Image: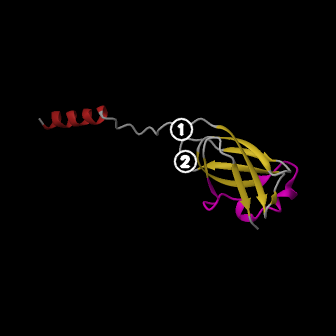
Amino acid sequence: MKVRVLALLAAAGVAVGCDSTPPPVAAASDVTGTVTLNGKPAGSVVVMFNPVTAGINPGSAVVGADGKFTVKLAPGQYVYLFEAEAGKANALKAIPPSYLTPDAAHTLDVAGGQPISLALQK
């Protein structure tokens, strides 16, 4: 009798959805943004976006000399950081060291299609 009750309870759990699959996330789309350092364009670096939100992919983009970039990101939360653009390591010297490694203090919520503004302070 106990076995039948346990079997029925287990079946009921499956029927009501004991699924641990995360909910689907929105598709990635092009997001534009700007990077400034003390109010001036910060360019010739690569900005990287590492997801905090489960189920979404990271993204990265080269930041132009005008401080502008375009990156493909899904809506969600990301930690952002910077690295040198190939052959332009000197440009990275201007970026404060705290932005060169993943840091929970540098998080960003991305909403579908909304521009990103990263205002760095030295």
Q: Which colouring convention does the figure follow?
A: secondary structure
Question: For this rendering, which residue is in front, 33 or 58?
Answer: 33
Residue plotted at (82% across, 49% down): 85
Which quarter of the figure is the C terminus placed in? bottom right
Kindly identify the residue that appears in the image at 44 percent across and 37 percent down: 21
Disc 1 marks a residue whose amino acid type is Val
Q: Is residue 45 above or below residue 31?
A: below
Q: Which quadrant holds residue 70?
A: top right
Question: Is residue 105 rendered magenta in the image?
Answer: yes
On the image, the x and y values in percent for residue 33 come to 73, 48
Badge 1 element: loop
Q: Image quarter for residue 27?
A: top right
Reply above or below: 117 against 60.
below
Q: Is residue 68 above or below residue 5?
A: below
Magenta segment: 83-108
Residue 85 is left or right of residue 30, and the answer is right
Asked if labels 2 and 1 touch by Cβ distance under 8 angstroms, the answer is yes
Pointer 1 or 2: first along the chain: 1
Q: Residues within 10 Å of mark 1 (few under 14, many from 20)?
A: few
Residue 60 falls within the magenta-colored stretch: no
Q: Quadrant of the N terminus?
A: top left
Q: Position of residue 99 (x, y in %)?
A: 71, 60
| Pointer 2 local density, CA inside 10 Å: few below 14, some 14–19, many at least 20 | some
Residue sitting nearer the eye, 102 or 64:
64
Residue at which label 2 appears: 53
Residue 25: mark = 1
Element under label 2?
A: loop
Instruction: Residue type at mark 2: give it.
Output: Thr
Is 42 positioned to the left or the right of 55 in the image?
right
